[in-house]
Image (cartoon, rainbow, N blue to C red):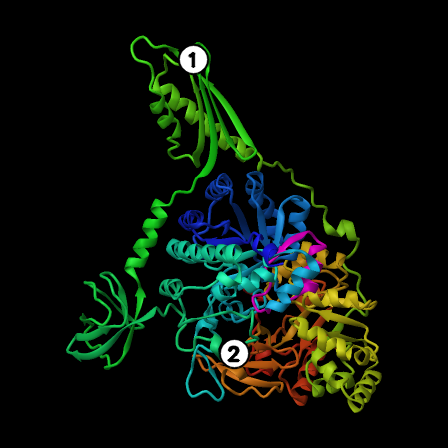
Amino acid sequence: MENRKKRREVEILAPAGTYEAFEAAIRSGADAVYAGGNLFGARAYAGNFDEETMIRAIREAHLYGRKLYLTVNTLIKEREMKERLFSFLKPFYENGLDAVLVQDLGALAFIREQFPDLAIHASTQMSVAGALGAGFLKQYGVERVVPARELSLAEIRKMKEETGLEIECFVQGALCYSYSGQCLFSSMLGGRSGNRGQCAQPCRLKYQAEGQKKPSCILSLKDIMALEDLPDLIEAGVDSFKIEGRMKKPEYVSETVRVYRKYTDLYLKKGRAGYQVSEEDKQRLMDLYNRGGSCRGYYHVQNGPEMLTPDRSNHAGIHSACVERQKGRSLLAKALVPLQKGDVLEISPKENVTLGQDVKKGGQFQLLVAKGTTVRPRTILARVRNERLIQEIQERIRTAEVRRPVQAKAMFCMDEPSKLILKSGSFSVRVEGSSPQAAKKQAVDRARVERQLRKMGNTPFQIESLEMEMEDGIFIPMQVVNELRRTAAERLEEEILKQYKRSCKRVPMVEQEEIQGESLISREGQKNVLSVLVETKNQLRVAARSEDVRRIYVESHLAAAMCSNQEEREEIQRLYEESKIPWYIVLPHIFRERAKRLLDSRWKAICEVPWKGALVRNVESLAYLQKKGWKNTVRADHHLYTLNKKAVEFLKKAGINGTTISLELNSQEIREICTPASEMVVYGYAPMMISAGCVKKSIGRCDGKESITRLKDRYQKTFYVKNYCDTCYNIIYNTAPLVLLEQIGEIEEMGIHEIRLHFTIEDTEETKRVIRIYADAFWRGQKTLTAAEVFADFTRGHYKRGIK
């Protein structure tokens, strides 16, 4: 078993936000590179590649036997799907693009339809949280999954064993506090959507949780460094080690690739017995970038304060000097590590100093700080730029020789065309040139001809072996030899790249209304449906007894809790019978193994309630219901994003009977994609983040009980954080509820006749009040009050502005 594992190939996958970073990755040993074009990438502010540069990168990667993956890992709007996606992908596909990473389910369906032999990788933005989700996506042509970063080693192993899909896991770089693809924080606060590659990273700012004495970066995680875990990951079946960092510089890319290449190869060669990570290599990576240390990610832990970087969220450098005293603007300091001229030391978050001389470890040196700067004795200064390390990496990138080995055979015979054959793997080319003539004075020197043939110059090739047949007494100009070599190298390049060439013609997209008839998804119920989603018993009691509510969604956490004992089971049955309206069970936001075990243990009791259907928020939940043989209606919540009709169509084919309008669409975009079976959230505190992190645990107050914690930002706005201990995740809600009250008439005019009120932190009286307000406007047609008249604080979300 050990020997078989050692023989496995594991891909080192590097990021490239610029062409310089791409070259650094290739020259440092990456097997594949992922990069974004000028559209649809989750790093909109990286350098990214224009069409010409992307094609150049694809060709260069292939010449060196490497791969290039394109990120199409954002949500795609309806007009973009119709007008831009095909033309964007076509030139890259035709030049042999190896794979695309996708988030949008509509994009998945579109690419499978238009580019059927292009490999599709499910981005971590898809929030794939288990074997159920991975297996579901496999049915629709996904070949590789990048699981949610939060998964444990055991969950990853199970995903591999049960699906056989390629698995790509992050091993180095930034960690998001939220499950990727489930964060609206930046979107709702500033209009820069993480789902569109424009995240402003508000999670890296300071917040103060109730019980904390001062604000801290309580939502900011340290970067992952999983060097110690590579053996475990390889044995779990991981196929690709992914380095995060399309915003990083070429030096960072080069060094991380070098280090992970080194230790992956070390394990594959020597196994666990010979595997040991040097502190020097760790230190080099920390010197390039760290946020106050590093962590090993979620592979062995669920969460914890040790994963956070509470004091700062940018590069913290490494501890390098200790201040001994200050006199005026002059600091006397002692070096804790060897320092070099050009190193940059941080005096304060707003002040850095560049060293003008080398300093040995333990040596004293002086620094001149800005006027008015005071630094206390024993203050530790961090080095935030290691000049010698950066220069070393730059030199390595510049001088690195990356060549494709070729075998050459040359033939020079009197009065016959000169011949040169180049072979590389299964590729072979043969070229001919001018015929050698009898030497009139001095015959050509054999060694000189061989030297000229081996000069492959700027080509990607290196002659590994050269067989040469040369008749004695001949003469051939070196110009002919050089031309023979150049022509053969060019032809070999063409021959290698030819295998990747593809052609495509757009498959006409029939308007979905023509396929499906009047609507994409069959509707149920009356013309106007006012539904409510409840998370507490009191909210459920109000909704069940209201004459205005026509559908109730019950959180599975609440349903599971109420089905845990006989008394509560009897109450939920009474409420159902009183309500006389359809009830839907709402499955968890994140459906991991823990959620599956919880529902499995209570499933029989839960199913005693005659649910009309279920509301799902992820593909794992849909797959779970299908495995359970669920025969009732299944609707999709807004977490299963439908920014385009192709995504709606995908969900219908997958078994969904109704969708929920995305919270990130504006009114015009809603008009473009809504169907008669669309439901729209018009009230509620929007979930800004779904996180495996726990705020209560981070402040030392974990008690294993579900509750609400409050976070305040720098403007003293309050965010509500709900912790679900039964499945161990947090939801951070917006500071104010979404209120679309005056817009009810316009929403109806769009053709949307099903609206939802989502209750989270509301008490009994507030729940009653909100239902009455919306029922008056939507159900009874009374004159609509303005939101400002009935709500102290509110937001209209993206209804007017939308996202870019």
Classed neighbour count for the residue bearing mark 2: other residues with Cα under 10 Å, few (<14), some (14–19), many (≥20) = some
Q: Is residue 149 magenta?
A: yes
Quadrant of residue 616 within the rendered picture: bottom right
Q: Is residue 640 left or right of residue 270?
A: right
Q: Secondary structure at mark 2?
A: loop
Quadrant holding the N terminus? bottom right
- Write the start and end of the magenta stretch as one range: 129-152
Q: According to the image, label 1 marks what residue? A: 435
Q: Is residue 469 left or right of residue 495?
A: left
Seen from the viewer's position, the closer of residues 2 and 670 is 2
Q: Is residue 658 magenta?
A: no
- The residue lying furthest to the bottom in this view is 567
Q: Amino acid at mark 2?
A: Gly
Q: Name above or below for residue 98 compared with residue 139.
A: above
Examine the rendering and report whether any part of residue 803 can be seen: no
- Estimate the x, y position of residue 709 in percent, counting from the top left: 55, 85
Seen from the viewer's position, the closer of residues 177 and 555 is 177
Cβ atoms under marks 1 and 2 closer than 8 Å: no
Q: Residue at x 62, y 78 (%)?
A: 728
Distance from the alpha carbon under mark 1 to that under mark 2: 75 Å
Q: Secondary structure at mark 1?
A: loop
Seen from the viewer's position, the closer of residues 633 and 151 is 151
Q: Name above or below for residue 609 compared with residue 660.
A: below
Seen from the viewer's position, the closer of residues 715 and 782 is 715
Classed neighbour count for the residue bearing mark 1: other residues with Cα under 10 Å, few (<14), some (14–19), many (≥20) = some
Q: According to the image, label 2 marks what residue? A: 304
Q: Between tags 1 and 2, which lies in front?
A: 1
